[in-house]
Image (cartoon, rainbow, N blue to C red):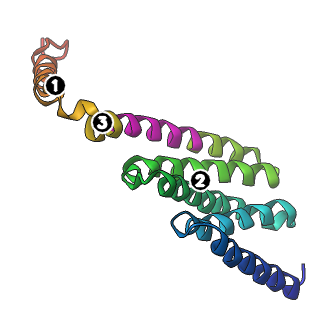
């Protein structure tokens, strides 16, 4: 693709982005300034030459951040960044997997799947922790204020007092 064509496409995309901002309520439109460039990178990775496949990684990351911001903007739940970073890690894995697919590199595909899985597991684990124990209804109950710390202390004391074969 020639430089003039690329510049022309970028100018058109910016114009469309600004026009969309005029028609969508402001509180919901601003994540599009992150989401649309990410989608553009992903499209470029798919339609470009094999050398453009590397754009799948930043495209996946920027698109994911844009989607997270869009959902947070719609729901007014910006505190979810405390665990949404796991999705950003997962997007690195998805981008790496896409890069591996587009460049026909099986090792990158495997690495991408591992990274995406780790990111999703961390997102789920921290999501449960923050939503139930920090932000949720369970945070204020006596069970979690008193019982959980006592159980943790008791479990730690038990592990320390157990008879181990190397001590005998």
Residue 126 in which image quadrant: top left
- Residue under the image location 12 percent in, 11 percent down: 168
- Residue 26 % position (x, y): 54, 70
What residue sits right under mark 2 in the picture? 92
Q: CA distance from mark 3 to mark 1?
A: 21 Å
Circles 3 and 1: CB distance less than 8 Å?
no
Looking at the image, residue 38 lies above or below residue 92: below
Residue 157 in which image quadrant: top left
Which numbered mark, 3 or 1, is in the foreground of this view? 3
- Residue under the image location 13 percent in, 22 percent down: 147
- Which of pointers 2 and 1 lies earlier in the amino acid sequence? 2
- Residue 13 % position (x, y): 76, 76
Instruction: Tell me if 23 is positioned left or right of 83 in this view.
Output: right
Density class for disc 2 (Cα within 10 Å; few <14, some 14-19, many ≥20) is many
Residue 127 in which image quadrant: top left
What residue sits right under mark 3 in the picture? 136
Circles 2 and 3: CB distance less than 8 Å?
no
- Residue 25 % position (x, y): 57, 67
What residue sits right under mark 1 in the picture? 152
Looking at the image, residue 41 lies above or below residue 73: below
- Which of pointers 2 and 3 lies earlier in the amino acid sequence? 2
């Amino acid at each position: 693709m020639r430089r003039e064509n690329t510049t022309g496409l970028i100018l058109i995309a910016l114009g469309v982005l600004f026009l969309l901002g005029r028609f969508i309520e402001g509180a919901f439109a601003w994540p599009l300034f992150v989401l649309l460039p990410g989608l553009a990178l992903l499209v470029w990775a798919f339609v470009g030459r094999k050398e453009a496949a590397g754009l799948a990684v930043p495209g996946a990351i920027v698109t994911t951040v844009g989607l997270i911001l869009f959902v947070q903007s719609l729901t007014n739940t910006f505190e979810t960044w405390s665990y949404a970073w796991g999705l950003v890690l997962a997007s690195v894995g998805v981008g790496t997997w896409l890069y591996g697919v587009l460049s026909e590199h099986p090792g990158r595909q495997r690495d991408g799947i591992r990274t995406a899985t780790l990111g999703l597991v961390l997102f789920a684990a921290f999501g449960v922790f923050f939503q139930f124990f920090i932000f949720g209804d369970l945070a204020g109950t006596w069970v979690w204020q008193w019982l959980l710390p006592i159980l943790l202390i008791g479990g730690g004391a038990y592990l320390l007092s157990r008879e181990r074969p190397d001590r005998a």
